């Protein structure tokens, strides 16, 4: 007999509200993890009118990820909130519609484009270097998280839209200031049992509307410019040079793919490509300044690979840097920036002895499994060497490691994200030593759609 939802263990909570008042939105990922120690890898929770299965069982998670789009969809509330704001892109599309979106998005983010845009990416690396050199010379403390965010905005807009934004050097009023307001609000609305913003517009709702309007104006202009470029240079139709052009050409051929879908995917890529990569970079700094012994090891690999260069000069050279890559993988194991994914089955389903009825809300949290000793030796320790080929760690279960999701909907920006991480960390540690100014104990995880670090400051020193 399968275990039914009603028989799952879980916190009792109080009548009607369940555990709603016990949950702290920015810390909910940690709360779900703590409860997994008490109730196990599959438990249930009631949050006001909403009941959810909370899952950290690697085999069940893999099943869900794999059986898409036919068997499972992203939680429907997410689509409702995103569409409510006019966002209809690959992240919230489902079924045949998703297949069409995915084909187009994958084309625009493929390695061929990354290679073609490598020189433009190098410009952003150089700008970042110049900014940090100044900071190192003056000895000032810097907000490196903001720099990472600006870098990822610049890269995403260049690669995806062919538009050089240069938010690294500009100050204030930039696209990133608007983007910052969008994710947290979407997260808040997805998690709110009542859509208050439809009844009352508070200050943060108004700010969110303003930010979304500004992004929409910018995207409309990019679409106009993109169409004009295609008109002026019809040869681009055979060989589009960026994501925007590829998607505009595809939209001409697909009846169901209009301006709404084009714009939806532009917003999606802008949102998905920025915070995730920037926050992963921030967490790698947090870990490398906490475990300083790894800075020297990383610098030794970078020195060897870069020789006299200040940063990676050619796309082909990014293939090396195996220890740097291990730092990135280990950072994502301990600090996954997307620690929570939400799904619903489209049919009644039995997985690993559990029965989930059609429409059951399923919250998958990924870090619990990735930090258990049965899946990763000394699972809670920062040990990048475990990702090296010669590692002797007996436990290394990739089934329990899903920082980029999995199955047919795994993150299509994975390679781009890893490339950006390599470019930035190689330049940073080649030229500077890094010291955390803010005490590590005071740096907190904040969940706001992606899991970011609370503010921290670092100091850079020129390497001799
Ligand atoms: C370290 C950086 C990143 C992390 C950790 C990350 C993580 C994720 C995760 C967990 C998902 C959900 C996958 C699933 O449902 O199985 C996802 C989806 C997605 N990501 Fe990323 N991501 C990163 C960077 C990027 C970048 C740079 C882009 C694009 C520029 C991007 C674009 C997308 C898109 C479009 C989706 C939706 C895919 C779909 O639904 O088919 N991501 N990402």
Image (cartoon, grey):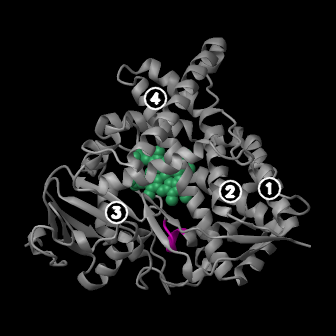
Give residue 88's position: percent from left, percent from top: 37, 36
Identify which residue is drawn at 77% across, 47% down.
122
Which one is nearer the viewer's eye here, 250 or 25? 25
Instruction: Name the N-terminal-most of marks 3 and 1.
Output: 3
Q: What's the mark number on residue 62?
A: 3
Q: From the image, which quarter does the C terminus lie in?
A: bottom right
The residue tagged 2 is 147
Instruction: Look at the image and say whether residue 144 sits in the magenta stretch.
Output: no
The residue tagged 1 is 131
What element does badge 3 sit on? helix
Identify which residue is drawn at 61% across, 12% down.
231
| Predominant secondary structure, magenta span | helix
The reply to whether residue 158 is visible in this rendering is yes
Instruction: Name the N-terminal-most of marks 3 and 4.
Output: 3
Instruction: Look at the image and say whether residue 335 sits in the magenta stretch.
Output: yes
Mark 1 and mark 2 in contact? Answer it, CB < 8 Å. yes
Give residue 176's position: percent from left, percent from top: 58, 46
The reply to whether residue 382 is visible in this rendering is no
């Amino acid at each position: 007999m399968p275990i039914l939802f009603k028989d799952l263990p879980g916190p009792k909570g109080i009548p009607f509200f369940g555990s709603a008042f016990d949950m702290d939105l920015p810390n909910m990922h940690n709360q779900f993890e703590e409860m997994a120690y008490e109730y196990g890898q599959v438990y249930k929770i009631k949050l006001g009118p909403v009941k959810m299965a909370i899952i950290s069982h690697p085999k069940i998670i893999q099943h869900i990820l794999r059986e898409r789009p036919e068997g499972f969809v992203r939680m429907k509330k997410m689509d409702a909130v995103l569409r409510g704001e006019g966002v209809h892109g690959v992240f919230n599309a489902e079924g045949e519609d998703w297949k069409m979106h995915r084909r187009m998005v994958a084309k625009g983010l493929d390695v061929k484009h990354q290679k073609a845009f490598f020189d433009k990416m190098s410009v952003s690396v150089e700008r970042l270097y110049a900014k940090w050199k100044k900071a190192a010379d003056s000895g000032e403390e810097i907000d490196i998280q903001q720099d990472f965010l600006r870098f990822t905005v610049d890269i995403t807009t260049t690669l995806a839209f062919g538009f050089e934004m240069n938010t690294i050097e500009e100050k204030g009023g930039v696209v990133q200031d608007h983007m910052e307001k969008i994710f947290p609000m979407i997260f808040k609305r997805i998690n709110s049992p009542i859509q208050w913003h439809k009844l009352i517009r508070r200050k943060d709702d108004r700010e969110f509307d303003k930010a979304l309007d500004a992004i929409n104006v910018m995207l409309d202009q990019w679409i106009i410019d993109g169409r004009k470029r295609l008109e002026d240079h019809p040869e681009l139709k055979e060989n589009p040079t960026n994501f925007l052009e590829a998607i505009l050409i595809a939209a001409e051929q697909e009846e169901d793919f209009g301006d709404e879908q084009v714009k939806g995917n532009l917003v999606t890529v802008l949102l998905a490509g920025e915070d995730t990569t920037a926050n992963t970079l921030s967490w790698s700094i947090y870990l490398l300044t906490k475990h300083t012994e790894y800075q020297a090891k990383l610098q030794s690999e970078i020195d060897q690979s870069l020789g006299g260069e200040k940063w990676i000069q050619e796309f082909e050279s990014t293939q090396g840097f195996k220890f740097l890559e291990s730092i990135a993988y280990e950072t994502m194991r301990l600090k996954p920036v997307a620690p929570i994914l939400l799904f619903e089955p489209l049919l009644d389903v039995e997985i690993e002895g559990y029965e989930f009825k059609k429409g059951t809300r399923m919250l998958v949290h990924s870090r619990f499994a990735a930090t258990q000793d049965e899946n990763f030796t000394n699972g809670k320790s920062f040990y990048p060497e475990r990702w090296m080929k010669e590692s002797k760690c007996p436990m290394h279960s990739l089934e329990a490691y899903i920082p980029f999701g999995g199955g047919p909907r795994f993150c299509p920006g994975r390679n781009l994200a890893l490339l950006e991480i390599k470019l930035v960390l190689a330049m940073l540690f080649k030229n500077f030593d890094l010291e955390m100014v803010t005490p590590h104990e005071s740096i907190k995880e904040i969940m706001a759609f992606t899991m970011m670090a609370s503010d921290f400051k670092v100091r850079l020193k020129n390497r001799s």
